[in-house]
Image (cartoon, rainbow, N blue to C red):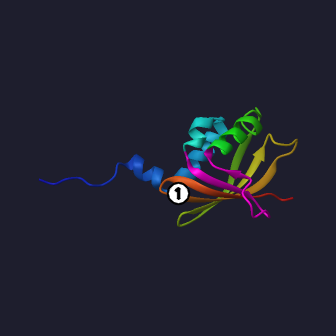
Amino acid sequence: MSINTSQPASSAAVADPSAVVQKQLDAYNKHDLNAFLATYSDRVLLYRIPGTTPVISGKQQLGEFYRTSRFNLPNLHAELLHRTVVGSKVVDHERISGLRPQPVEAVAAYVVNEGLIESVWLFYPE
């Protein structure tokens, strides 16, 4: 008798850093706060470069920010222009519409650990 010890495909896909970040991006574009937050660690830290101190600490603060300052914008949408994955790090180059009159390009660098985003570094052109 053999025992199947492999993970189901869905669990393996969620553990893949690129799949976790894609799930986060999909939830962002749907303005689905619960699905968005489900991709983050409770202790997530978010940085806006060149700053070295987190601008957001923890999932609760992240949720409040996105609820009141992002997902309330009806035209908010991020278009993925390029993605690079190196181990547990995922770097997305995006074009974000709905924040300002003209789209803004940004780079988001994610660190994924145990299937959850634990830190994010955001780079904006200005």
Q: Secondary structure at mark 1?
A: helix
Q: Where residue 116 sits: x, y (%)?
A: 53, 52
Q: Residue at x 35, y 48 (%)?
A: 8
Q: Is residue 44 left or right of residue 77?
A: left
Q: Where residue 117 sits: x, y (%)?
A: 57, 54
Q: Where residue 103 sits: x, y (%)?
A: 82, 47
Q: Is residue 55 left or right of residue 20?
A: right
Q: Quadrant of the C terminus?
A: bottom right
What's the amino acid at mark 1?
Pro
Q: Residue at x 61, y 40 (%)?
A: 27
Q: Is residue 36 left or right of residue 11?
A: right
Q: Quadrant of residue 69?
A: top right
Q: Residue furthest bottom?
A: 86
Q: Which residue is mark 1?
A: 17
Q: Residue at x 54, y 56 (%)?
A: 18
Residue range highlighted in magenta: 39-59
Residue in front for this viewpoint, 44 or 1? 44
Q: Where residue 39 sits: x, y (%)?
A: 55, 47
